[in-house]
Image (cartoon, rainbow, N blue to C red):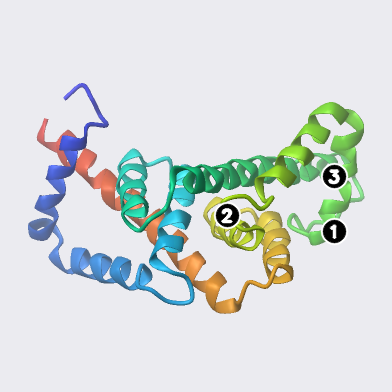
Amino acid sequence: MSNLYAKENMKHLGHLKELAAEQLKAFNEFNAAVFKEGALSKKEKEIIAVAVTQVTQCPYCIDAHTKAAKKEGATLEELTEAAFVTAAIEAGGVVTHGTHVHQAKNQDASDVLYSRSNLKSLGQLAKFAPEGFKGYQAFSAASVKAGKLSTKFKEIIAVAVANATQCPYCIDVHTKNADKEGATSEELAEAIMVSSAICAGGAYAHMANMIQSYQD
């Protein structure tokens, strides 16, 4: 098959029951548990899911969770705002990791690669790429500004996305922001579990391609 991303590929997932029944059952139960109504509604969880699928870049997951979010009442405006949170977190991960360049050039720098104090070096980017850094700051601020989604919920999304991108600086900054906006530990924990399920789901969905390739 020349089209690696065809919706019809998903039919191959039907073979998983015979290939790995125990693992499939455990995955399905995990996924179902994560998306149950809790501190976050099903709608909120599906919006978070759509945001995280922009990180995993799994077209099957984007399709499935966009449809699921729509079914739960999410609007396209809400989903677009959530996706922009992801874009800003992706940008922020690169920007904050840019501090490592400054550390690498400093012979007296600590051997600890991930120190919270590294963020003090962000001024180096502002100094040497002022226009780009200013543009990033404006974009980052706009991404969490209240719109169809509240700032609190956008920060919850940001925490979920930051865990998916595995950027410790982003996790730290946006957890603090979410806490400041009134997000509860339960809300953050459920958002993180959605992120976990989506990351697992990307691998699960791509098994369809694996089976297709094996059968070719």
- Say which amino acid is labelled 3: Leu
Mark earlier in primary sequence (3, 2): 3
Distance between mark 3 and mark 1 Cα atoms: 10 Å
| SS assignment at label 3 | helix
Query: In which quarter of the view is residue 8 placed?
Result: top left
Question: Observer-nearest residue: 189 or 26?
Answer: 189
| SS assignment at label 2 | loop
Q: Of discs 3 and 1, which sits in the foreground? A: 3
- Say which amino acid is labelled 1: Ser
Q: Of discs 3 and 2, which sits in the foreground? A: 2
Distance between mark 2 and mark 1 Cα atoms: 31 Å
Q: Of discs 2 and 1, which sits in the foreground? A: 2
On the rendered image, what quadrant is the C terminus found in? top left
Residue at image point 41% right, 61% down: 43
Q: Name, please, the residue furthest toward the top.
A: 2
Q: Which residue is mark 3?
A: 122
Q: Which residue is mark 2?
A: 149
Vertical side of 200 occupied by 127: above or below: above
Distance between mark 3 and mark 2 Cα atoms: 29 Å
Q: Which residue is mark 1?
A: 117
Vertical side of 204 occupied by 12: above or below: above
- Say which amino acid is labelled 2: Leu
| SS assignment at label 1 | helix
Q: Position of residue 59 (x, y in %)?
A: 34, 38
Mark earlier in primary sequence (2, 1): 1
